[in-house]
Amino acid sequence: MEHYNMNLTLKVWKQKNCKTKGAFETYQVQNISSEMSFLEMFDILNERLIAEGKEPIAFDHDCREGICGTCSMFINGRAHGPWHQTTTCQLHMREYKDGDTIVVEPWRSHSFPVIKDLVVDRTAFDRIISAGGFISVNTGNAVDANAVLVPKDDADDSFAAASCIGCGACVAACPNASAMLFVSAKVSQLALLPQGRPEATTRALNMVKQMDQEGFGSCTNIGACEAECPKGISLENIARLNREYLGSVFTGKASS
Amino acid sequence: MNWKQYFNTSIGKKLIMATTGIFLIVFLVVHCYINAQIFYNDGGTRFNEAAHFMGTNFVIRFVEIGLFGFLIWHMILGLALYNKNKSKRTAYAVNAGNKTSKWYSRSMALLGTLILLFLVIHLRNFWAPNRLSTLTGGEELPLYNMMKEQFQQAWLLAIYLLGVFSLAWHLLHGFYSAFQTFGLCNSRYKDMIRFIGVAFSIIVPIAFASMPIAFFLHLLN
Ligand code: SF4
Ligand code: FES
């Protein structure tokens, strides 16, 4: 693909912290290469802002290779921009033409309060994992890897669920701000394996309870999460979570 | 957790929406089947027989109470969920719209409300006067002739068509969604359920729509 440069107008959400109200601010960026990533374009803008003595735009990023899930940006109405199964760091400027206007917002969900500008607090996800996303193992020496047999299909499905990077795009894209896709991936990766069975009757219940407590919305099977997930986590995981939940309801031990 | 808590979580409420929804779907099938008797075009003899059975059978009367209970539960819980979900975030300046989801999946509350408005008119025209008449010791009303008469009004026909139209889209999401909620949409059944859901959402509403249209066009005597 041919290389070209472009000038763009950016409308970026600026917000001091979760207590203050934010607003859009407009920036012009010049000479952006079509081969840059979306975040590199932000780097250039920020360098200029710093040189001008202005405050740079705060945004989250870490690996810049699509595996850490921190680079949350809601770009022109799409979580991580318009590309299919892509994080913001993997979105490249060849998507845009000279003269385009790009609106960039943070993930909007009351469960993900804004820390600053485009940076949101996703620790709600960590608390959901702590509520049930674990297994019990023996202490002592590590057991032989092949001591527990796992059917290949289950291993594959579990692995696919485990590829969730906890980015929160599912919550950001969902009209209900529901975290079901994330929770379903975290339940599925363990529920599919024999190692995850001991906690099976309580895991779904506990994680769903925590999910509700964190204030995420209720899933109504709209499917925008699956469409926007950078890792292609499937709605089948939500069906599995529902199944696990139903199983706990009827077979789990009643307690108060 | 106790039973009440199980059904008070977000998934628990989903399960209630799905269960009541499936019950309402079953009701639609029965209702459609009974009404389709008008197409024998026998001046309503068969239809009135069927309506008489439905109107007087003890079991059906009992199920009818459950039906209203489930309908009201489905409505109230649905609207409550809609309101609660809306309060979970401030709105985006730019939305993905139809790029990441279907408009009818996002509009279940609106479609449901339209169906409800239709239902109020529908019940007021047929069900309520008929029940009132029998409860006060009177005769069953001649429902067939009432339909024949009422569906001469173009505005009423329009309301019925709007109701059925809303129902079709509501079903298109609801049918599949219920099975997803029960956890049945895995790779094995997903396509089948989707197919049946689409077929159901087309066939049943068209069958319903054909009834007032047939009367309006004087196709039935
Ligand atoms: S399910 Fe997908 S969109 Fe949601 S947190 Fe995991 S990787 Fe991100
Ligand atoms: S920065 Fe790690 S996924 Fe984008």
Image: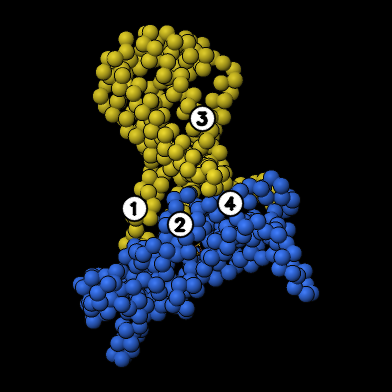
Q: Amino acid at mark 1?
A: Asn
Q: Chain of mark 3?
A: B
Name the residue that disc number 2 marks.
Answer: A226
Q: Nearer the viewer, mark 1 or mark 4?
A: 4
Q: Which tag is nearer the camera, tag 3 or tag 2? A: 2
Q: Which chain is yellow?
A: B
Residue B183's place in the image compared with B71, above or below, is below
The answer for how far apart the CA atoms under marks 2 and 4 are is: 14 Å
Q: Is the C-beta separation of discs 1 and 2 under 8 Å?
A: no
Say if labels 3 and 2 share a chain.
no
Using the image, tell me which numbered label, if any, was put on residue B98: 1
Shade representing chain A: blue
Instruction: Residue B201: give x, y in percent of width and height.
Output: 41, 35
User: Which element type, helix, strand or loop, lies under badge 4?
Assistant: helix
Q: Which mark is residue B26?
A: 3
Q: Residues within 10 Å of mark 4 (few under 14, many from 20)?
A: many
Residue B125 appears at what percent x and percent y?
Answer: 38, 22
Amino acid carrying mark 4 in the image? Arg
Whether residue A159 appears in this view of the structure is: yes
Tell me: A114 left or right of B210: right
Q: At numbered mark 3, what does the secondary structure look like: helix, strand or loop?
A: helix
Tell me the quarter of the image containing the C terminus of chain B: top left
Mark found first going from the N terminus, 1 or 3: 3
Q: How many marks?
A: 4
Please name whichever residue, A233 or B156, is drawn nearer the observer in this view of the structure: A233
How many residues crowd around disc 1 within 10 Å: few (fewer than 14), some, or many (20 or more)?
few
> What crowding class fits label 3: few (fewer than 14 Cα within 10 Å), some (14-19), or many (20 or more)?
few
Q: Which residue occupies 78% across, 75% down?
A: A141
The residue labelled by disc 4 is: A240
Label 1 marks a residue whose chain is B
**Which residue is painted at 67% across and 59% down in the image?**
A150
